[in-house]
Image (spheres, rainbow, N blue to C red):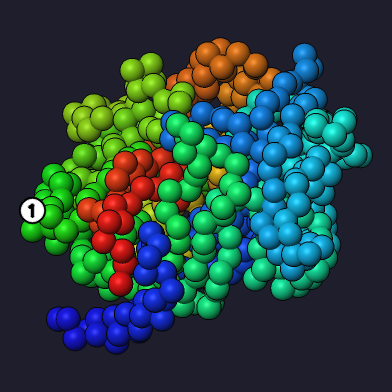
Amino acid sequence: MRSLFLLPIIVFISACSNNSEHNNECVFRYNQPNTVTSLDPAFARNQSNIWAVDHIYNTLIQLDDSLHVQPCIASDWNIDSSGTIYHLTIRKDITFHDDDCFPNKKGRLLTVDDVIYSLNRIIDTTVASPGSWIFKGRVAENNPFSVVNDSVVEIRLIKPFMPFLQMLSMQYCCIVPKEAVQHYGKTFRQHPVGTGPFQMVRWIEGQTMILKKNPNYFEFINEKRLPYVDIVRISFIGDKKTAFLQLLEGNLDFLSGFDPSMASEIFTTNGTLRSRYSDKIQCYKAPYLNTEYLGINLDWPTDNFLHIKKFRQALNFGFDRQGLLETIRQGIGTPAISSFPPSGLPSYNPGEVQGYRYNPSRARQLLKESGYFNLPVEKRPILSLYTAKEYSDYCLYIAKQWEQLGVRCKVELAESATVREMMRNGKILFFRGSWLADYPDAENYLTVFYSKNPAPPNYTRFKNAEYDRLYEASLICKDEKERFQLYQRMEKILVEESPVIFLYYDAITNFTSPMIKDYMPNPLNLLKVKYIKKDCRNPIK
């Protein structure tokens, strides 16, 4: 068995042995299964890029582990009475990393001009940032970002959008110096210059990345300057089984996720870590802002039972979500017993918004009321549920339970990209989907069903006038409690109308070595290395 891992391990250990210069420093080592494609924040569109960019740069606003907005480069902010003008106060004690792009290679102080330059760069069509969508249709068309004075910047919106501060915490909005972008040109993606807790030492693409502590970092906790570790070493082992073995053998300190085929090997049936690993690794689970669902194209040109609300409700009652998680995912995740926005969001309230639980008798009654049972079994239409191969087990499990109720369902397999394209073009009626948060506010989920939105995000083509009215009201509601109440009224409409079959809310499963202390996962699964503590009394050899 271990011979299968031999070559990757030899390569990994060889890479480690070339870092003897770090013997007397505290090194935090983690694996990223997908390669980093760019260290330019304007291209921080996937997890591997986002994590690396977050180590090196800072945003105006940051989020704590409970997803509440906190100061970062901006020490304070206020929003005018119209909800469209934001004033952010910029700290004057933050310096960029020392780099060749600056005179005498000495990092300079960050200024309000850097903020304006960085935000404008996101919407600059010549840059072609994939993050331009966060400002498109939201910020003023002319001069949306401006300097008020040497401490304050102004952002002007077209109309109120209360989750805007959360969007400013996205890594697209990291602050970069103009000198670095101009000095490095097209190679800026390889030569990051930020203000973050770590700065670049070496990057061998697809193999390893080495970062070192920024000695001038501006954040402190209890008078202790962050970060706590001296070196970050990132490996890029694509095979998750190999990476897990490296964690067990002490060559990694952190690993996010695992190969699904290893679930029963790592966890018991109730999702706890097997005892054989308890002295080698630590396991952390937390809500993850991802909702898994089955979507229905309500704009399908021909009549079908999926367009009957009671039939959709019957499907929601007609399968065991907890059984699905226990059977397929070793209990990892939470049954979607509320609405579309998942657990982990500040507004999540399953007591207020009660969704569907497994109730086969209620499902049969609704199927009868929908007229489905009026047809002979052989003439009942067969549901064609489209999914990618990696999710076929989920869909087959659900289809089997529906068939026990008398509902005929066939699982159709296609490539992930093909399914997404058919969802976008309205070429399929019934499909498996998931929605992962871009920013931690329920609006990011509720926008999926706003009728004025195209597909994406409104893959179901859902239309409901009351829902739209509540959605538009929530965008301008400044009081958080009242806004959450508007969200929950929308969620109740989604439960009633059932444009989707709610499956489960995902969960983060991260592992650390026993040397890591006080690690706290967050629902965005963002690895905040500046807070990582490691017992380095025995330095890495």
Asked if 446 appears above or below 11 in the picture, the reply is above
**Residue at the image position 45 percent from the left and 57 percent from the top:** 230
Q: What element carries label 1?
A: helix
Which residue is at the front of the view, 189 or 360?
189
Q: Where is residue 470 in the image (x, y as percent from the top left)?
A: 61, 19
Quarter holding the C terminus is: bottom left
**Residue at the image position 66 percent from the left and 63 percent from the top:** 192
Asked if 96 appears above or below 105 in the picture, the reply is above
Which class describes the residues within 10 Å of circle 1: few (<14), some (14-19), or many (20+)? few
Asked if 462 appears above or below 9 in the picture, the reply is above
Q: Position of residue 388 (x, y in %)?
A: 40, 63
Q: Is residue 297 left or right of residue 119?
A: left
Q: Is residue 434 visible?
A: no
Q: Is residue 363 left or right of residue 20?
A: left
Quarter holding the N terminus is: bottom left
Q: Can residue 169 be seen in this view?
A: yes
Which residue is at the front of the view, 288 or 148?
148
Per the image, the residue denoted by label 1 is 275
Q: Position of residue 23 (x, y in %)?
A: 37, 69
Badge 1 amino acid: Ser
Q: Which quarter of the figure has residue 255?
A: bottom left
- Pick out the residue farthest to the left: 275
Q: Position of residue 218 (x, y in %)?
A: 60, 42
